[in-house]
Amino acid sequence: MTAPVLENLKLDAEGFMTDPSQWTKEIAMEIARQEGIETLTDAHWNIIEFCRKVGQQSGKAPTLRQITEGAGVSTKELFALFPKGPAKKVAKISGLGKPEGCV
Amino acid sequence: MTEEKNRHMAFICSKGNLDMVYPALVMGWAALGNGIDVTIFFTFWGLDMVNKARVDHLEIPPLANTSMKMNMMGVPGYIGIPQWMGILPGMTPFATALMKSKMKKLGVPTVREYLEMLSDAGAKMYACKMSVDMFGLKQDDFLPCVEKIVTAGDFMDMTEGAQIIFI
């Protein structure tokens, strides 16, 4: 069953949002819950906001290394905040597509 | 509910040339980013990757490397580098510097930095006991990312059910 906030959301086959303008903080919180992150803390939001900014500028989700360098967060913290596969999780929660690029 | 075992990939790194150390680093990083467990085992020349004295000095020789063409230096087409030129002093450092500068432009981290990223992201790394003994090395010679020196048998135990990639 889809949560009410996620209704009418345009998604691709892998569950990434295809229209970043549909994104709201409530949607982010709901997707995070589905990805196993119960509450988004300030540290999470710092990363999400950085990804949103990159997404708005380039139309693409940043890679993990761009996040660690750009948002001033260590690799350890990033993997602790978004455990088990931060690459896709961060992009999904931020309402962006799958990150392109290898690093 | 039965607990599903997480996907696990194990890389065996047996080479120390600059071009051959990157595959495991790139794939390992991608695996961790996608929530896959990663184990890396360093053996033979692959120990150079995690040897404190060697990690920043890995090289690529143009000699006997038929894929390295002059287009790396901006010469159009695929004109080869004559093999005899490869034996000239300075050719290996030259090719190495060229490759490093190309990777830097692409934002590819250095080997040392990559290993630190992998370690921070949870990759487990081990050195092969037989190779360590053969080269007369000890735990202290390795970067801190190397958890310990293990035998081939230990490696088998650690990688049960994993997808194994030999490089």
Image (spheres, rainbow, N blue to C red):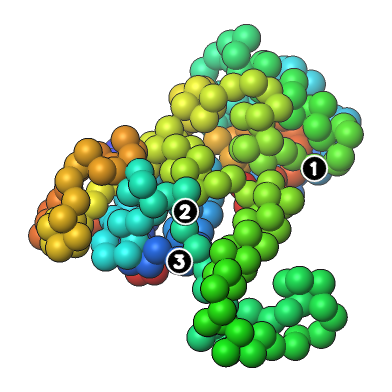
Numbered disc in front, either 1 or 3: 3
Q: Is residue A65 left or right of residue B54?
A: right
Counting labels gives 3
Q: Earlier in the sequence, mark 3 or mark 2?
A: 3
Q: Nearer the viewer, residue B85 or B43?
A: B85
Q: Where is residue B142 drawn, in percent x and y?
A: 29, 43
Residue B17 badge: 3
Q: Secondary structure at mark 1?
A: loop
Q: Secondary structure at mark 2?
A: helix
How far apart are the two marked residues, 3 and 2, measured between alpha carbons?
Answer: 10 Å
Q: Where is residue B111 drawn, in percent x and y?
A: 49, 49
Reading the image, the residue beneath label 2 is B57
Residue at point 89% right, 34% down? A57
Which subunit holds the residue at mark 3?
B
Numbered disc in front, either 3 or 2: 2
* Amino acid type at mark 1: Lys
Reading the image, the residue beneath label 1 is A60
User: Mark 1 Cα within 10 Å, few/some/many (few <14, many 20+)?
Assistant: some
Numbered disc in front, either 1 or 2: 2
Quadrant location, the N terminus of chain A: top right
Same chain? Circles 1 and 2: no
* Amino acid type at mark 3: Asn
* Amino acid type at mark 2: His
Which subunit holds the residue at mark 1?
A
Residue at point 55% right, 47% down? B110
Q: Secondary structure at mark 3?
A: loop
Q: Where is residue B66 drawn, in percent x and y?
A: 58, 87
Q: Nearer the viewer, residue B51 or B83?
A: B83
Q: Quadrant of residue A91?
A: top right
How far apart are the two marked residues, 1 and 3, measured between alpha carbons?
Answer: 34 Å
